[in-house]
Image (cartoon, grey):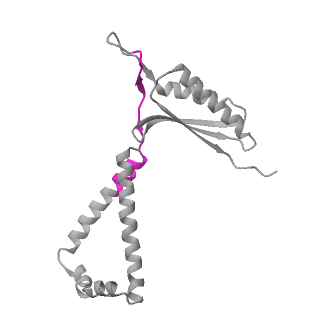
C-alpha cells in the first residue's frame, strides 16, 4: 500500500465516520430539543424527499449513482488488495561499465527456506512488494505452538544479519510476522 492510498483510505474513513456520527447524534439532539438541531430539522422538506422516487429522472439518477459508487468501491477494494511487487534491485557496485541487479524473489525464497528448516516451523511464505513506497521483503512464519518463540526470534535475527552482511547497503526493508497454529487437544 502506498502512502497516497493510505491517505485516501484514512480520509474516506474520517469523512464517513464523522458523517455517521452526525447523522446518529442528530435525532438524539432533536429528542432533547437542542435548538440548532431542531432548527436544521425544520429546513427538511419531507414531502419533497418523499416525492423524489416519482420524478421522471429518478431512475436515471439512481442508475448513475449506482454505477459511480460501484466503480469507486471496486477501485478501492482492488487497490487495497493488490500488492505492488518488485524483483530486481540495483546494486551499489553498478557503474558506467555495467549494471548489477539482484533478483530479490530468489533471495527471499532462500531466506524462507532457511527459516522453514528451523525445528518447529511448519511453513514460511514470502512477499516481495512495496509497502508505503518502500521495497520490503515480508516473511510470514507459521510455527507449531510448542516451539519456543526465542528459537524463532534467534533464527530470524541470524537470517536478517546474514542478509545484511551478504548485501551491504541494499535499501530493502525486511518484515517478519510469526504466527502459531492452534493448540491441539490432548
- Asked whether the viewer can see residue 176, the reply is yes
- Asked whether the viewer can see residue 78, the reply is no
Most extreme residue toward the top is 97
Residue 63 higher or lower than 161, as above or below: below
Residue at 36%, 70% in the rendered image: 19
Magenta range is 73-93
Residue at 46%, 25% in the rendered image: 170
Q: Is residue 72 left or right of residue 159?
A: left
Q: Is residue 72 left or right of residue 93?
A: left
Residue 124 higher or lower than 11, as above or below: above
Residue at 48%, 28% in the rendered image: 105
Most extreme residue toward the front is 35
Q: Quadrant of residue 156?
A: top right
Most extreme residue toward the right is 186
Q: Is residue 145 left or right of residue 133?
A: right
Query: Could you tell me residue 61's position as x and y percent?
Result: 22, 69
- Residue 13 located within the stretch drawn in magenta: no
Query: Could you tell me residue 4's position as x and y percent?
Result: 34, 47
Query: Could you tell me residue 136's position as x and y percent?
Result: 47, 35
Q: Quadrant of residue 16?
A: bottom left
Q: Is residue 158 left or right of residue 128?
A: right
Amino acid at each position: 500500500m502506498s502512502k497516497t492510498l493510505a491517505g485516501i483510505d484514512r480520509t474516506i474513513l474520517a469523512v464517513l465516520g464523522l458523517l455517521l456520527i452526525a447523522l446518529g447524534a442528530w435525532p438524539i439532539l432533536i429528542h432533547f430539543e437542542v435548538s440548532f438541531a431542531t432548527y436544521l430539522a425544520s429546513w427538511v422538506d419531507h414531502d419533497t424527499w418523499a416525492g423524489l422516487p416519482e420524478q421522471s429522472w429518478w431512475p436515471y439518477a439512481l442508475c448513475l449513482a449506482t454505477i459511480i459508487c460501484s466503480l469507486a468501491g471496486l477501485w478501492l477494494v482492488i487497490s487495497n488488495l493488490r500488492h505492488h511487487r518488485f524483483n530486481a534491485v540495483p546494486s551499489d557496485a553498478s557503474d558506467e561499465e555495467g549494471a548489477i541487479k539482484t533478483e530479490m524473489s530468489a533471495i527471499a525464497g532462500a531466506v524462507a527456506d532457511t527459516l522453514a528448516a528451523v525445528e518447529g516451523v511448519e511453513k514460511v511464505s514470502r512477499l516481495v512488494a512495496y509497502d508505503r513506497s518502500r521495497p520490503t521483503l515480508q516473511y510470514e512464519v507459521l510455527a507449531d505452538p510448542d516451539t519456543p518463540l526465542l528459537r524463532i526470534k534467534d533464527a530470524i535475527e541470524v537470517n536478517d544479519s546474514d542478509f545484511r552482511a551478504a548485501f551491504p547497503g541494499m535499501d530493502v526493508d525486511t518484515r517478519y510476522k510469526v504466527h502459531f497454529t492452534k493448540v491441539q487437544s490432548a
